[in-house]
Amino acid sequence: MSEPNTPPKGLRFAVDYGPLLVFFVTYYAAGIMWATAAIMAATSVMLGVSWYFERRLAPLPLVTAGLVAVFGGLTLLLADETFIKMKPTIVKAFIAAVLLGGLAFGRPLLKPLFGAVWKIDDDGWRKLTLRFGLFFVAMAVLNEIVWRTQSTDFWVNYKLFGTIGLTFAFSLTQIPVFRRHWVENPAESA
């Protein structure tokens, strides 16, 4: 396998949020069916770009891409926007199940993902994993409520601004956990 190429600044952000932005812009330009096709294409392109620069595909974007392909394909094939609206619920529920399932087996799975960046003790990892797991349960439920009770326009705006805003706000509320459980010597958190 060849060595990874030097990724441009902002690659991770583009891979994570680029398809969502493409969906949003296309929705307002051409409607939900075109937006669904656009997010499917953009997700495929972003996976290719990620592979080119990193020479690997992270599991979560890969699972998300699979769900976009399945639910987007059903949306287009059956001409029913219900499927693309359900996709965020499935993704959030999947993330919650992985985090909470790992915790049930004594494995705070945020630590392997972010341990190189966040230097906190094991108790902090357990707390963060539980909190983020429950947050994703709440986000799955909220997506269900929004798409089932609101207009498609409202749901599209919620999908972009609401989910990003709520995730950012929730993450900020976790700063006290980082402060209480931060360790200067990472060997202490093992």
Image (cartoon, rainbow, N blue to C red):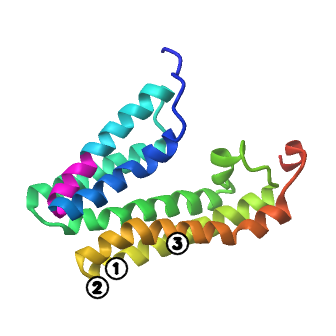
The relative height of residue 107 versus residue 171 in the rendered view (above or below) is above
Query: What residue sits right under mark 2 in the picture?
Result: 149
Q: Is residue 83 visible?
A: yes
Nearer the observer: mark 2 or 3; the answer is 3
Helix, strand or loop under label 1: helix
Query: What residue sits right under mark 1 in the picture?
Result: 146
Q: Residue furthest bottom?
A: 149
Asked if marks 2 and 1 touch (Cβ < 8 Å), the reply is yes
Q: Residue furthest top?
A: 2
* Mark 2 neighbour class, 10 Å CA radius: few under 14, some 14 to 19, many 20 or more: few
Q: Amino acid at mark 3?
A: Leu
Q: Residue furthest left?
A: 78
Closer to us: 108 or 51: 51
Q: Label 2 to label 1, Cα distance in Å?
A: 5 Å
Magenta region: 31-40
The relative height of residue 135 versus residue 75 in the rendered view (above or below) is below
> Relative to residue 75, is residue 98 drawn left or right?
right
Which residue is at 60% across, 65% downward? 132
Q: Amino acid at mark 2?
A: Thr
Q: Label 2 to label 3, Cα distance in Å?
A: 19 Å
The relative height of residue 185 versus residue 131 in the rendered view (above or below) is above
Q: Quadrant of residue 125?
A: bottom right
- In percent of width and height, residue 47 lies at 38, 37
Query: What residue sits right under mark 3 in the picture?
Result: 166
- The mark nearer the N terminus, 1 or 3, is 1
